[in-house]
Image (tube, helix red, strand yellow):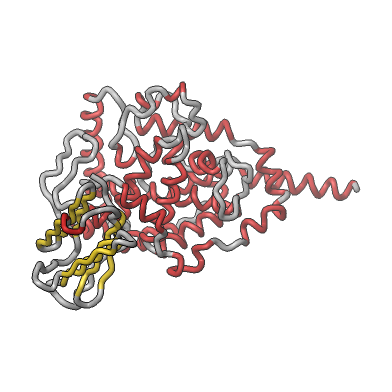
Amino acid sequence: MITPIFTVTQDLKFITIVVKTPYIKASDVELYCEGPDFTFYVKPYYLRLHFSGNLVDDDRVNASYDIATGEMNIKIPKETPGEEFLDLDLLTKLLAPKSVNKVPERPLIEVIGDNDDGDDNRENDDELFEKENDGQKSFNDDFLIRELNSNVNNDVNELLSTAKYGFNRLYSGYFIHVQETCNEILDITDPEKSTPESRRQDRINVENSKFDPDHYIADFMSAEEIRHLIKSKTVWWKGMSVLKFTEKENAIMRNLPNKHYLLENVELESIYYGLVDLLFAYSYNYRVFEGECTVESPWMIGKISPTISCLEQFNSIEDTMIALYRRSLAYPWYRNYELTKKCQEDVYDLLKLGKRAILKVLLELKDLFDHHDIYYIYSKILLDDYCIWSQTKASDKAIRSLAHKLHHCKILKSDIGWHLEEYEQLALEDAQEQQAMN
């Protein structure tokens, strides 16, 4: 069955659903309304929507078909006039069925029921970044819980023949033939037999070997050449005026699979930190190419992002940002500390705008990687899930708290581990000597 193109709007009393279904017989259309659920069926189209409020199936329901445009216009009354139905522009969330669809198999976790709006999970989500180890007892309790979880995970991993990676470590088997695919993003040796610890160590080792002091010094001494990149404004400074989804973005949302996720708090934190990672890599690419995507963009975004290039998962904002600073000073053409700091500010701006701005970025990243012959696998193991999760489960309150944490996260040059200040001092002294000689 085909999911048709559709839009949903509302007024105080009615929900209006416009469904594009050309070349059908209007008399064959079947409509069903029950509580928050709406179903539309006519061969070969099938559409099921789940709203945040209840509908009423009575004689006020009206449907008309425009043969010229091929659009069916359906008006359905709200059970409670004046109620605002939420997230009508988040199409994947609207399409999510009431029953739970399984995500890729994960040991020891089973979804046994459904929560329509995810309120319980969202309450936990909202509090993620508000409890900052304000007492020794909470620290000890958290440490004990992490140790117990770690022990369980270690026992499980011993039973598994392959590594787990990607969104919430749900995937395996995508890199079995990686040596044959010319994947220039991946920095992990033998990812199918890797562990989180080995992946982190691989990342650090490769970054250390890749860092080029001469390149860094050259960019430091010629900072004026890239100052315009640092001073330029991104489209996001316009704020809410840019947050209406395009038809291309709507099409991507309609085609995303429906999934529900069962996440523990530790896993949820890691997902939010991974989001910061992806937004940073996007922001760097945006600044360097001045808002355009090029043939180099998938490589640059993937290489800067440790979540993509090293299948990393982080447990703190500090670790996340240090890794991003290191990679942005080791891989791309412009390796400038001030440019990297500006990209961190860009991520802060995106987080302040909320999940719709974030979703637009994720949809752009997904579309970019979808159309690459090799790197499309990162959509399968990461970006698809982030696009779904950001619509259905991500909390605006948690995102605001995350923005606050990011804003107060200061990464010093000494935190990066490459003696940057010493190199800069030597370069300045050498320049002064050259100037004195001349």
- The residue lying at 16 percent from left, 55 percent from top is 28
> Which image quadrant for residue 72?
bottom left
- The residue lying at 58 percent from left, 33 percent from top is 210
Is 374 left, or right, of 221 in this rendering? left
Is 230 left, or right, of 90 in this rendering? right
- The residue lying at 18 percent from left, 53 percent from top is 41
> Which image quadrant for residue 330?
top right
**377, 65: nearer the viewer:** 65
Q: Give the mark count.
A: 0
Is 205 left, or right, of 404 in this rendering? right
Instruction: Residue 10 in the image: state x and y as whole percent.
Output: 26, 71
- Please determine whether, in this image, residue 333 is positioned above or below residue 292: above
Q: Is residue 310 visible?
A: yes
Instruction: Residue 199 in the image: state x and y as whole percent.
Output: 41, 32
- Please determine whether, in this image, residue 296 is positioned above or below residue 129: above
- Please determine whether, in this image, residue 52 is positioned above or below residue 22: below
Instruction: Residue 156 in the image: state x and y as whole percent.
Output: 21, 29
**425, 165: nearer the viewer:** 165
**259, 429: nearer the viewer:** 259
Q: Is residue 134 visible?
A: no
- The residue lying at 36 percent from left, 52 percent from top is 251
Instruction: Residue 274 in the image: state x and y as whole percent.
Output: 38, 47
The N terminus lies in quadrant: top left
**45, 246: nearer the viewer:** 45
Is 57 left, or right, of 67 in this rendering? left
